[in-house]
Amino acid sequence: MSKRLNFQALSDAFEALDVDALKQFYKSDVEHTEIDAGAPPRSPRTSGWDYIAGAVAGAAQAGIKIHLNNPVLGEDRVACTITCEFPDGRRMVSNTIYDLDDGKIVRQLDVQVMDPEQA
């Protein structure tokens, strides 16, 4: 039987903005795809673990809070909503799907939208 992703521990690591704790949930060659206003479906933004780690570290430095909600848990796939709260009150919301292999994230798809900057 394959391992299952511990979603609560993943959520805790994201909310703590703890890159070292997050690394244990990802395969080193994770495929990360983002779709948003600047990266539409026909040309999404693609990256890997280094980008994810940098984004979380940057969020910590910027005072951004991250919350994972609405989990749908399966053996080979997990989905959730990730909400990022910025110090200026803006929010980014991402519906995220994690594809798993033996309890580790091998692919992450984020479809996200962000509040516009205040004028």
Image: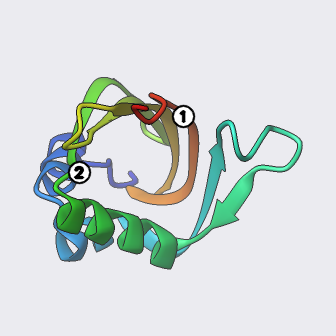
Helix, strand or loop at mark 1:
strand
Residue at 65 percent across and 38 percent down: it is: 36
Q: Is residue 42 left or right of residue 116?
A: right
Q: Disc 2 or 1, which lies upstream in sequence? A: 2
Q: Quadrant of the C terminus?
A: top left
Residue at 54 percent across and 34 percent down: it is: 112
Q: Is residue 45 left or right of residue 3?
A: right
Would you place residue 17 above or below residue 97 in this image? below
Question: Would you call the spot at circle 2 few (<14 residues within 10 Å), some (14-19), or many (20 or more)?
Answer: some
Residue 22, given in percent of the width and then of the height, sits at: 26, 65
Residue at 23 percent across and 61 percent down: it is: 62
- For residue 112, the mark is 1
- For residue 87, the mark is none
- Name the kind of residue labelled 1 in the image: Gln
Residue 102 can be seen in this image: no
- Extreme residue toward the right, this view: 42
Question: Would you call the spot at circle 1 few (<14 residues within 10 Å), some (14-19), or many (20 or more)?
Answer: some
Residue 77, given in percent of the width and then of the height, sits at: 50, 38
Residue at 38 percent across and 55 percent down: it is: 103
- Name the kind of residue labelled 2 in the image: Leu
Q: Which residue is mark 2?
A: 10
Q: Are marks 2 and 1 in contact (CB under 8 Å)?
A: no
Q: Quadrant location of residue 2?
A: bottom left
